[in-house]
Image (cartoon, rainbow, N blue to C red):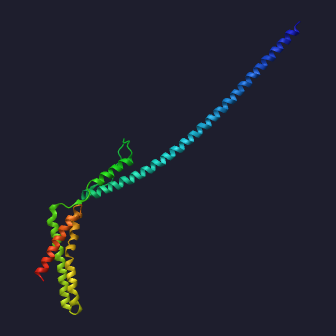
Amino acid sequence: MNQPVASETYAAQVRRLADVSARVHAQREEAQSWHERQCVAADRAVAEAEEQVEQAERELADARELQERVDAEAAHLWQLLRERLGSAGRRLTGAPAPTAGVDADPVLLLGQVRELLDRTRQPGELPGSVNPLLAACGVAGAVLAYALGAVARAAGVGYGGDLAVGMPVLALVVTLFGPLVGLVPAKMLADRRNAVLGPRPITVVLAAGLAATVLLLVLFR
């Protein structure tokens, strides 16, 4: 009478064992699947991290290159400012330190600084108030040329021969270049005033030099 009960108990145990084995197998499969998913996620995270590192290295290299360009451009603009200021600029030493907390594009800011420097202290034409000085330059050039011509004529007379014929011609050519000689000091005057020797100043110099040359030729012919 006890054998059927034992058989049923054995059968129940076998079923439980089968259920446990199935659950263990399912859990093992789930664990394996979870492990594979974790590995895939870890590989993906590592790949993304490596890509971020490479991107950060590229951005760092670009930032360093930009910094070098900005520093070089800032040094150039500072030197340009010192040159524009002339003697006052010589008292300026190194370029000022970068300002913290500025989020604007440094290249754009430097471009605006360059544009501002280009607009300021541009050489202009000499004012009309220096016309007497320009006329004096023309007269001085004419006198100097006439003096050189006189020396050449005297040398021709002193040496005689072919020089006595050729030197007066050379003296006349030198004398006629007198008005042009006056442009040399006029250009120096314009440079000192940070101005250009435009058409009006040139006309004043040439007119004064020509008038002085004609007057000298008439008086000392």
Q: Is residue 96 visible?
A: no
Q: Is residue 78 left or right of residue 132?
A: right
Q: Is residue 202 above or below residue 24?
A: below
Please state the horizontal and vertical placement of residue 53, each as a whole percent of the image: 54, 43
Q: Is residue 158 above or below residue 69?
A: below
Q: Residue at x 17, y 73 (%)?
A: 209
Give the farthest residue toward the top: 1
Please state the horizontal and vertical placement of residue 162, each as a whole percent of the image: 24, 91
**Where is residue 144, by image quadrant?**
bottom left
**Where is residue 146, by image quadrant?**
bottom left
Give the farthest residue toward the left: 219
Quarter of the rendering occupied by the N terminus: top right
Q: Is residue 18 visible?
A: yes
Q: Residue at x 17, y 75 (%)?
A: 142
Count all numbered tags in the image, as a single digit: 0
Q: Residue at x 45, y 47 (%)?
A: 63
Quarter of the rendering occupied by the C terminus: bottom left
Q: Is residue 130 above or below residue 215?
A: above
Q: Is residue 34 above or below residue 7?
A: below
Q: Is residue 184 left or right of residue 96?
A: left
Please state the horizontal and vertical placement of residue 182, each as a whole percent of the image: 20, 72
Please state the horizontal and vertical placement of residue 91, each as a whole percent of the image: 27, 56
